[in-house]
Amino acid sequence: MKYILMMQYPAAGGDVPSMDQWPQAAVQAHMEHLRLFREEFTTSGEMIVTHALAGPDDARFVRARQGAAPEVTDGPFPETKEFLAGYVIVDVDTAERAYYAASRWSEGPGPDGAPLNLPVEVRRIMWASGEDM
Amino acid sequence: MTVASAALDRQTTDLLRELAPRVLSAVVRRYRDFAAGEDAVQEALLAAARQWPQTGLPANPGGWLAQVASRRMTDQIRREIARRRREAVAMEGDVQVVSPSDDLDALAGRDDTLNLLFMCCHPALTSSSAIALTLRAVGGLTTAEIASAFLVPEATMAQRISRAKQSIRASGAPFEAPDATERGERLRSVLHVLYLIFNEGYAASAGPVLQRADLAIEAIRLARAVRALLPDDGEVAGLLALMLLTDARRSARTGPDGELISLAEQDRGLWDATAIAEGVALVETSLARGAVGPYQLQAAIAAVHDEAARAEDTDWLQILALYGLLERMADNPMVRLNHAVALAMAQGPRAGLERLAELKGDKRLAGHHRLAAVRAHLLEMAGDRDEAIGAYRTASALTASAPEQRYLLARAARLAGT
């Protein structure tokens, strides 16, 4: 079963300063944690893909419009409390394995070296097959 | 590395897949290294796939593969010895350089396919690892084919297979038949892995077919191989029968747009009569022997469905009795659900709904789309239109299968329009 894990990061002014405000050693520790996390699920043969996303300042919202060019607006919206920091897609035998992967990711250390424990949304990916109903 | 499978005709592909486990057994017996031997055989299969279309089939295809695999093993051992010399590592174990010789030719003498299966379906492995390793080592499929069948990147599948081999190595499992006490348990794991491979392929036939290796056909082929080795085992016969009787309905179970068609609404003229006849015969012979197990019972249920010329001719009383036996034998939530359906068909929807209410407490079914879907069907049968629509919608929100979701929403829409 394939799952997508999506990490939510507090927007500016939230509980966690953005990474460019962290001490260098804390950034390194976080990157090392990510490396170990990726390695654990790559060597197990469960990792499909993982990507970090560029910051939200660069985000755009696009909406098609009837009879006009699509509307492209800057994001995020002022009321946005958190944004998608990155995602991981794994292929696992059980839901528990997906939750475990999410918890390992969530444990990444923050600016003071303590685990950030950021929320990770875990969603099943739809598949294109089915059984007799 | 991928094989240009298109360049190989079906016959050659089948031959390679049939020879793969035999060549691998010979190599493992000789070099006593399953992991490396498996890689070597895989390379030999790829070499054959590249060369045979140009050179034609060798006189002794099995011998040819064994020679190539053996040469790969020898090269690897030489490299290993050289590396250890360079690194001044103490020699451990008896590394021998054996030149390929004719004794590898004695492939036909023994069939170790079963031992290979025992190894690939080792209890130390997760089911997805066992599936991948079985398809490669015993099925002779390439990593690329397996990856595409499971819709994962080739690198992920390669890693899964390599991890599986490490686990087997770490478990210290010898390449020999498990003893009598362990054998039954180990055979159950083998059958379960083949069943999972079949299910993956059967369910997938509903989706858009994306160059998938045909896993259902592959599973049937492997089950036939096991049956040839264990002709007196009822559960082996039962599993093969279950696959044949289920796969017989394949072309009827999806419509032109890949939409699922329920068993009751399938065009039974599209069912494969030859497969049904073979499946039914297998069920009858194995049931007559006694020692009935869960695969035989599931096959017997599939046989009752397949023997009904029209859905309304289905002998639900017999199916109900079979589910009663099956439920006593295996505590499986899906069996309990299907039992409720059989009850509804035999004694009316209210009886089925009462049984479903009893299943509400089963944690394994809590929030499962199939429970909601069955409930919706029974409510529809009972004429509780609004409740049925709600249950269909609930089920559609819980499933991760796109065709099932479309099916459930279509049922809800059809009811809402009445």
Image (cartoon, coloured by chain):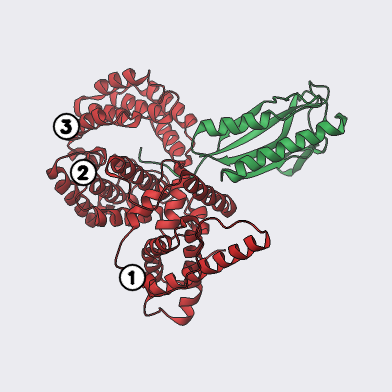
Q: Which mark is residue B310?
A: 2
The color chain B is rendered in? red
Q: Chain of mark 2?
A: B
Mark 3 residue type: Leu
Q: Secondary structure at mark 1?
A: loop
Residue B220's x, y, as percent? Answer: 32, 54
Q: Which mark is residue B317?
A: 3
Residue B349's x, y, as percent? Answer: 26, 24
Residue plotted at (51% across, 51% down): B161
Residue A127's x, y, as percent? Answer: 50, 42
**Is A111 rendered above or below residue B196?**
above
User: Residue pushed farthest left?
Assistant: B288
The mark that comes first in sequence, 3 or 2, is: 2
Give the distance between the C-alpha atoms of the residues marked 3 and 2, in whole angstroms.
16 Å
Labels 1 and 3 in the same subunit: yes
Mark 1 residue type: Ala
Residue plotted at (66% across, 59% down): B88
Q: Report crowding for label 2: few under 14, some 14 to 19, many 20 or more residues within 10 A (C-alpha).
A: some
Give the distance between the C-alpha atoms of the residues marked 1 and 3, in whole angstroms.
53 Å
Q: In which quarter of the view is residue A74 placed?
A: top right
User: Residue pushed farthest bottom?
Assistant: B55
Q: Secondary structure at mark 3?
A: helix
Q: Confirm whether residue B367 shows in the render.
A: yes
Q: Going by the image, does B248 lie left or right of B361?
A: left
In the rendered structure, are the residues bearing label 1 and label 3 in contact, judged by CB atoms less than 8 Å apart?
A: no
**Is A33 rendered above or below residue B390?**
below
Q: Report crowding for label 1: few under 14, some 14 to 19, many 20 or more residues within 10 A (C-alpha).
A: some
Residue matched to label 1? B106
Q: Nearer the viewer, mark 1 or mark 2?
A: 1
Residue B127's x, y, as percent? Answer: 44, 42
Q: Which chain is tinted green? A: A
Q: Nearer the viewer, mark 3 or mark 2?
A: 3
